[in-house]
Structures are given as structure tokens and as C-alpha cells.
Image (cartoon, grey):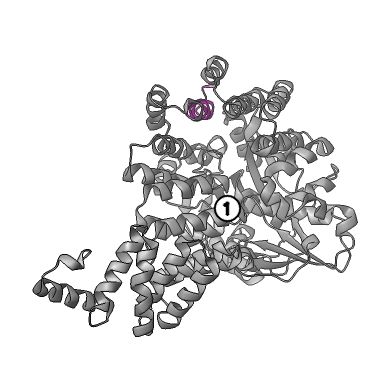
Amino acid sequence: MNNQATLGRKDRRAQQAKAAKIYGIKGPESLDLHEAYNALARGEVLRAVQLAHPVTQSHPASHHGWVVMGGAALAQREGKTARAFFGEALALRPKDPLVLGGIAKAHVLEAQVEEAVQMIPRAFAAGSEDAGLARLYLELMAKLGRRLVAADLMADHVRRLKDAGLCLKLADMLIDADEPNRAAAFYHLAYDLDPRPEAHRIGRLRALVTQCRFAEAEPVARDLLEQVKDRDAVAGMLLLLLRVSGRSEEAEALAESFEFATPEGFAHARGVMANIHQDRGDDAAADAAFLEAIHVTGNGGNMAKAYGVFLLRRGQYAEAAPYYAQRFPAQQRGLVPLENAEAGNLSGLDRVILMGEQGIGDQLALLTLLRLAPLKADARVTLVADGRFGALLDGNRLGIDHHDKADFLARPQELAPNQLVYLGDLTRYLDGSAGQGAYLAPDAGRVAGLRETYSAMAEGAPVIGVAWKSTSLIGHLRSVPLERLAAALPEGALVVNLQYGDCAADIAAAQAVRPDLRFVSDDTVDQMRDLAGFAAQIAALDHVASIDNTTAHMCGALGHPGAHLLIPMGADCMWYWGGEGPRDPWYGAAMLHRQARAGDWTGPLESLGAALV
């Protein structure tokens, strides 16, 4: 059908009938349309226009001619013209993915970014299979600082498109958004679709390390060191693996002997060594390693944030501030300037929009800083965060409202630029004072109902909630095997599972060690969907024994009097808990059972057992 002139009359009639069925136009114009599409695909813009323009005049009710004309305008980078042509097509086919995608691209050419990022999801919801359009959307949303919104909207479409490069791009974007577990799935998918590119093989290694699949990851890493150009990235993954699996001496030997090709690779190695020094209790060496890493790269980023966190845990708040402030890329920081959190600005605002950041537990912790911030007494404060915070914050003692982050970012907002403040920027007001106390007010009816249920099941025995593991790399060294935690619990206790995900094997192993305990998994509470219900569940318990995770911060925000937290030594001790002492310095509620040696839970579990007697 590309070469109409050479067709015989019979063949031409057959081709014409086929084209008429495809394009809904009878006569020779159907063949013209087909050739116009093909010409556009070949980059023959003038030929496409010559064939399609007459069709727009003879058959204006057919969207095809307008689509070709719009595509030709896009090829010539004429955004306004393209939008006009695609607009004609949109009036005829309002749910056509090609039309919606064309309008989105026209908006980009006109520098109408917001309009573009609103239109592109509509194209994919309509069934677009344009991998280039998906890539464009991810790039635009990354520049706008909306990585998680983009990932939420596009994850299923990326899986459907089965484009290896697109999977890799989404995985990298999720890493930048501090969502390594979600990124791992797309690194694996990119590799499964095409295992040949170096980036896909390194991505697979990153996924294996992120998922704590160290036995699989180590041979992959050592093989890649002999095969790839980007050896720095592979060495960095191997260093993380060795340190997290308790092989610090091997990690140190690799860090000192490896010849890094880039400042970034060397800086990453110094960062791993800073963590190893913290694990050994050598803060002076950790301090020096952090500063060396920051100096080598000449910029802050994640290394500056890590150093800021290190200083915050030591109580060096003033010294930490400039480093912790660098936790966002410059472009993202430009949207919410650090200066917005200054006292001179905050104290004059009637309305403050607090942008949530980091994980659920971090946000629960950082919200207490509102009690230190110099806000007007009658200022309206709104937290922009995960939708699950809405019900959780009902009746809170901080007097703040909530706005679902997905909704906030999906549409233009009427606000002054100086009203936006990152939640973590309030750390500048830390002064070492006592814990800021509880602020959540769980639903009294739900608490009473759950307490009654658990009390009836316990028959006079203590009711103890437990959370024991994190499936992420960052939480690996905070995790405790449930059978070891169960060994510390009082005889006959009712043990309520506060862990998310499939825990059947862990519970079976613990039950074998402690047959006297009764383990309960309450399917009426889903902490992954209902944070308010999770808060009510925790409030209904006599005691909670938890590692440092969301459960720990929920206990603190509730002011639970029976909370016991297992705290690791070294770099994996979150800064909210400080560096020493048995009393929670952040909320002022929980008892802390600290490791005396990194990786050794013997002492903390003995202390926990004694406290629960």
C-alpha cells in the first residue's frame, strides 16, 4: 500500500477496501491517509501534509487527517499549530490516546508544562502505547519534583508497555524519590526484558542488594566487576552488601584498595566507611569520612544529608542545619526555599503549607517540631502528605489540617510562594529540650472495641503488640528475628502482630520456640491502608515491643506508656533517639533498649524481658 502507482486495478481496489475499513473513509482518500501515516513515520513531513491536508477538507469529520497534520506540525516543532490540528481531532475523538498524546506534546513545545503533565495520564488511561510519551512524562515530573506522583500514575502502564529502557528510567526515578523497594521491581523487569545492557545488569544488582538477597547479589557483583565499565557503581553496591551483612573488615579492605574512577564513586565509599566507623563507635573517624566525601564531590546531596543526620543524632543542631538542608536537589529545593522556614517568615504567616517528606514514621516524628516553631497563634497549618494521614490527624493536639498530597500536586493551588515549608526544615528550631510529647488522638470507640476484643482473648494475660522486621536494606540491621523477640516476652502473653506483609513463617517459628504464647493477626486492621485504625490498635495494647519503624513513631505520637523500642548501635540508630540513655528523648514516652555492640541484640532483648516481667 506504500506504492500505489505500481498496483494493478484489482489490487488497488482490494487495498482501498482494506484502507476504507481501517480509516472509515471510502474512495482513494483512504489510501492517501494510509500513505500519509507511513510518510510521517518515515519522517517525510511534506509528503504527509500533501496527502493529509486534502482529506481534512473532503472529510473533516474524520479525525485521521487532523492527526497526521498535527503529527507533521510536531515534527516541525510548531506547538501552537499542532495543538490546533489535534484540537480538531479531539472534538471528534475525545478519548483517542493518539490525539491526547499529540496535544500533550504540543503543550510541551509551547512550554506549557502543567497542561502537558495533566494530559499525558489521560492518554495512557485511554490506552496509549507510546513509550516515548511515557518517558517524556517521567522526565517532566522529575523536574517538577513529583516523582512519586508520576510513579503512582505510570507504574502499571510501564509494566504494560514492556519497554526495558522505560522500566530502568522509572526504577532510577524511584531511587531518587527514596523508594528503593519499589525501584527494585522495575530494575528486575528491565533486566528480564533485556539483560544485555550494562545499565540493566547493574540495575539488577542494585535490586538484589536492596531486597537483601545477599547470597545472590555477591557473585553477581564480583562477576560484574570484571565485565562492566561502570565499576564504581558495582563496587559501591558490594560495599553496601558487605557492611550490612556484618563483614565490615572486608568492606574496609575493598574501600581502601579499589581504584575509583569518579569522585562520586570514591565519595560513596567514604560514606560507607563513615557508617562502619559509627558502627564501631568511632564518631571522630566517621566525621572525617563524611567531610572527605562531601569535599571530594563538591556538592551535598545524599552525603550532606547523611552527615546532617549524624550531627543531629549527636545533638549538634546548629552544625547539622546547613548539611541537612541539602537533602533535596537544587531544582526541588528551589520550589520550597529554605528561607521559608525562617522565623521572620513563619511568624508573619496566617497560613502555612507543610510539605511532608521522607517516610510515614519520619513525618510522625517531625510533626512534633511544630511545638518549637515560631508560628502565629492563629495560623492555619496544613500538612500535605499521604492520604492516610487524613483520618489519623482527626482531632490532633497540634491543631493542623491535612491535604492529600496526590490531590495537592495534581492541580494548581492558590497560595503564596512563601507559605510552602518542608516539614524537615523545622529542625532548625531544635534546642535539645525534653521530648515534645504526644499529639495524636485515636478514635476512642475503636480503641475501646479493640481493647475489649484483645482482653477477652488474653483472659487476664498481658496484651503485647510486636513489630520485628523491615524488608528494606536500610532497615535490615534494625530487624530482629521474631523467635528471639518472642523469647523475651512474659509467659502466656497474647501477642498481637503489628507487622505488615506475610508473616506466617516468622510466627510459626516463634510459636515453636514459645508454645505458651498466643499469636494473633487482626485482619480488621490494615496498617498499610488505614493509619487511623493502626493507631487505635496500638492504643488498645498493654505493651508494644518494636524495632525502629513506623510502629515506634506511632507509639511516640500516641504517648503510649508501655512502648519498648529496640534500638541498634551505630549508623542505623535513627537520630530521633539520640546516642545514649534508656528514655526516649524525642517524644518522652518510650523505653529504649539499645545495642552495646552493632549487630548484637542479646543485651537489648534481656533488658526488654526484664522490663516486661
- Horizontal and vertical percent for residue 203? 43, 38
Position of the N terminus, as image quadrant, is bottom left
Q: Is residue 279 left or right of residue 104?
A: right
Q: Is residue 287 left or right of residue 57?
A: right
Q: Of helix, strand and loop, which mostly describes the magenta segment?
A: helix
Closest to the observer: 127 or 468? 127
Q: Is residue 28 above or below residue 359?
A: below
Determine which quarter of the picture holds residue 321. Answer: top right
Position of the C terminus, as image quadrant, is top right
Can residue 437 be seen in this snapshot?
no
Q: Amino acid at mark 1?
A: Ala
Q: Is residue 146 above or below residue 49?
A: above
- Horizontal and vertical percent for residue 294? 69, 30
Can residue 140 be seen in this snapshot?
yes
Q: Residue at x 56, y 51 (%)?
A: 465
Q: Is residue 394 left or right of residue 219?
A: right
> Farthest front residue?
5
Residue under numbered circle 1: 142
Q: Residue at x 36, y 60 (%)?
A: 44
Closest to the observer: 427 or 584? 427
Magenta part of the protein: which range? 234-247
Q: Residue at x 48, y 77 (%)?
A: 87
Q: Residue at x 59, y 45 (%)?
A: 546
- Label 1 sits on a secondary structure element that is helix
| Label 1 packing within 10 angstroms: few (<14), some (14-19), many (20+) | many
- Horizontal and vertical percent for residue 611? 66, 40
